[in-house]
Amino acid sequence: YSGKATFFTPNQGACGDWNDNNDYIAAIGGSLYGSYSHKSKYCNKKVKVVNKANGKSVTVTIKDACESCDKTHIDLSPAAFAQIGKFDTGILKVDWYIQ
């Protein structure tokens, strides 16, 4: 996917696990995640996220869903976001690949 990355404060994610700011995790858009009534087929899949501006990348695990995110938007934990960009940027243009 080619889209944008933002960051969020993790807690208990849609996949059922508790996570915190230091975990390398991501939330994917609700339309991609699927029904919230059961665990998505994407839960626990690895995703490589590449910042298009600087080429830095990070690998994260899908642990949550982001209702306000569209299909190409990925929401990262603070630790993961910090690996590829600066917080004051807020929104990064990225390519991301489900592995």
Image (spheres, rainbow, N blue to C red):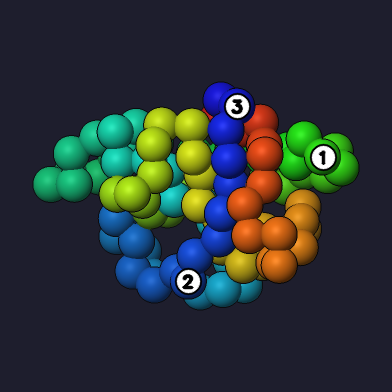
Q: Nearer the viewer, residue 10 or 5?
A: 5
Q: Nearer the viewer, residue 2 or 12?
A: 2
Which element type, helix, strand or loop, lies under badge 3?
strand
Q: In the picture shown, does residue 82 fall above or below 28? A: below
Instruction: For the residues labelled 1 and 2, say whether their Cβ atoms are less than 8 Å apart.
Output: no
Q: Quadrant of residue 2?
A: top right
Q: Residue at x 29, y 33 (%)?
A: 31
* Image quadrant where residue 3 sits: top right
**Can see residue 24?**
no
Q: Where on the picture, by quarter, is residue 90?
A: bottom right
The crowd level at tag 1 (other Cα within 10 Å; few <14, some 14-19, many 20+) is few
Amino acid, disc 1: Ala
Compared with 51, 7 (above or below) is below
With 90 as the anchor, is 82 left or right in this view?
A: right
Q: Contact, CB < 8 Å: mark 3 with mark 1?
A: no
Which amino acid lies under the numbered mark 3 shown in the image of this protein? Ser
Residue 21 position in % (x across, y down): 56, 73
Residue 11: x and y in percent read: 39, 72
Q: CA distance from mark 3 to mark 1?
A: 13 Å
**Image spot of residue 26 (x, y percent):** 51, 52
Q: Does 40 sit left or right of 75 as displayed?
A: left
Q: Residue at x 62, y 72 (%)?
A: 22
**Secondary structure found at label 2:** loop
Q: Which residue is mark 1?
A: 53
Considering only order in the chain, which callout, 2 or 3, is on the residue closer to the N terminus?
3
Q: Residue at x 51, y 44 (%)?
A: 74
Q: Which residue is mark 3?
A: 2
Amino acid tagged 2: Thr
Residue designated by label 2: 9
Q: Can residue 28 be seen in this snapshot?
A: yes
